[in-house]
Image (cartoon, rainbow, N blue to C red):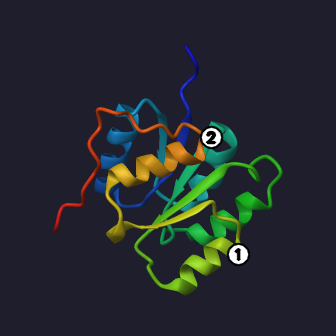
Amino acid sequence: MDTKKKILLVEDDTALAGVYRSRLELEGFEVSEVNNGEDALSSAIDFKPDLILLDAMMPKISGFDVLDILRNTPETGNIRIIMLTALSQPKDKERAESLGVDDYLVKSQVVIGDVVERIRHHLGMSETAPDQPPVTPVAS
């Protein structure tokens, strides 16, 4: 059996983080969860995740600064990073892309199934199971 892929979940909204953690663990990932940018940096070194799901607006160090530091640190420079944020302005996405983000998802524009699919894609695990119906967003 192959080893579980490791996801570092960086999200300061504990309720949302809990939802994502539960779904990712159900999907077979090993998940480590932190709620600020400072802890994200130390966990990226200690936990050695395959992918980081990173919020932009966080206490201590912003997600953009975390992204910049991770990309410029030899031990973490090649970790896949998906920003999952409430920031929907093109300038925010451009900033993240200029700092080397792998993907940029706006929370209000995706459902959790979309996020899982993007994670699988970036980890080279993208195969949609034939018995899975497509995910449709629920109107809020």
Query: Is residue 8 in sight in this rendering?
Result: no
Q: Residues within 10 Å of mark 2 (few under 14, many from 20)?
A: many
Q: Nearer the viewer, residue 10 or 124?
A: 124
Q: Which residue is mark 1?
A: 98
Pinpoint residue 85: horizontal percent, then vertical percent: 44, 69
Residue bearing mark 2 = 50
Q: Residue at x 48, y 85 (%)?
A: 89
Q: Is residue 3 left or right of residue 68?
A: left
Vertical arrangement, residue 42 with respect to residue 23, above or below: below
Q: Quadrant of the C terminus?
A: bottom left
Hey, what amino acid is under mark 2?
Answer: Asp
Distance from the alpha carbon under mark 2 to that under mark 1? 21 Å
Residue 76 lies left or right of residue 29; in this view the side is right
Residue 26, quarter of picture: top left
Q: Amino acid at mark 1?
A: Ser
- Give above or below for 5 relative to 100: above
44 up-or-down from 81: above or below: above
- Mark 2 lies on a secondary structure that is loop
Disc with the residue nearer the chain's start (2 vs 1): 2
Mark 1 crowd level (few <14, some 14–19, many ≥20, 10 Å Cα): few
Q: Residue at x 35, y 60 (%)?
A: 13
**Is 76 positioned to the left or the right of 18 in the image?**
right
Instruction: Decide which of 132, 73 is in the foreground and name it.
Output: 132
Q: Secondary structure at mark 1?
A: helix
Residue nearest the observer in this picture, 114 or 16: 114
Residue 135 visible in the picture: yes
